[in-house]
Image (cartoon, rainbow, N blue to C red):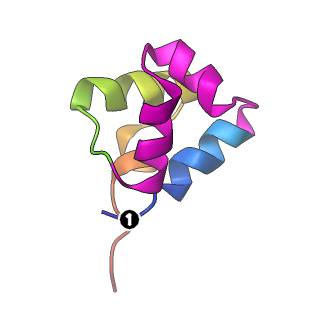
Amino acid sequence: MGKNLKLKAARAAMGLTQQGLADTVGVTRQTIVAIEKGDYNPTVRLCILICQSLGKTLDELFWPEAQE
């Protein structure tokens, strides 16, 4: 599992800090940091909460890019 740059970019585009997103979805900032770094695999429930907060789909934020 690599870094989640799509999540980081979507969060930044919404003007949210890691703490702001963490507060919105009810986790610690460290959890958001770990997800963005690829060190933590979030639950589907947490993925959905993050997507709803950022106005994105699961595919847009969490599905790996197709390898050609």
Q: Nearer the viewer, residue 65 or 15?
A: 15
Is 13 drawn above or below residue 22 in the view shown? Answer: below
As drawn, the residue found furthest toward the front would be: 30
For the residue carrying disc 1, how many other residues have a C-alpha within 10 Å: few (<14), some (14-19), or many (20+)? few
Rendering coords of residue 60 (x, y %): 45, 48
Q: Nearer the viewer, residue 51 or 22?
A: 22
Query: Relative to 8, is 62 on the left or the right?
Result: left
Q: Name the residue at 46% across, 23% down.
A: 28
| Secondary structure predominantly adopted by residues drawn in magenta | helix
Residue 24: within the magenta?
yes
Look at the numbered disc 1 and give the secondary structure of its residue.
loop
Amino acid type assigned to the residue bearing label 1 in the image: Gly
**In the figure, is residue 58 to the left or right of 54?**
left
Query: If the image is split into quadrants, where does the N terminus sit?
Result: bottom left
Image position of 37 (left or right of 8): left
> What residue sits 26% from the left and 23% below the top?
45
Residue occupying image coordinates x 62% and y 42% = 10
Q: How many marks?
A: 1
Q: Residue 53 location in percent, x, y? A: 53, 22
Asked whether residue 27 is drawn in magenta, I would say yes
Percent position of residue 34, x then y: 42, 44
Residue segment shown in magenta: 13-39
Residue occupied by mark 1: 2
Image-quadrant location for residue 24: top right
**Residue 21, position as x, y percentages in the image:** 57, 24
Q: Is residue 37 above or below residue 67?
A: above
Q: Camera-side residue: 47 or 35?
A: 35
x 33%, y 72%: residue:
66
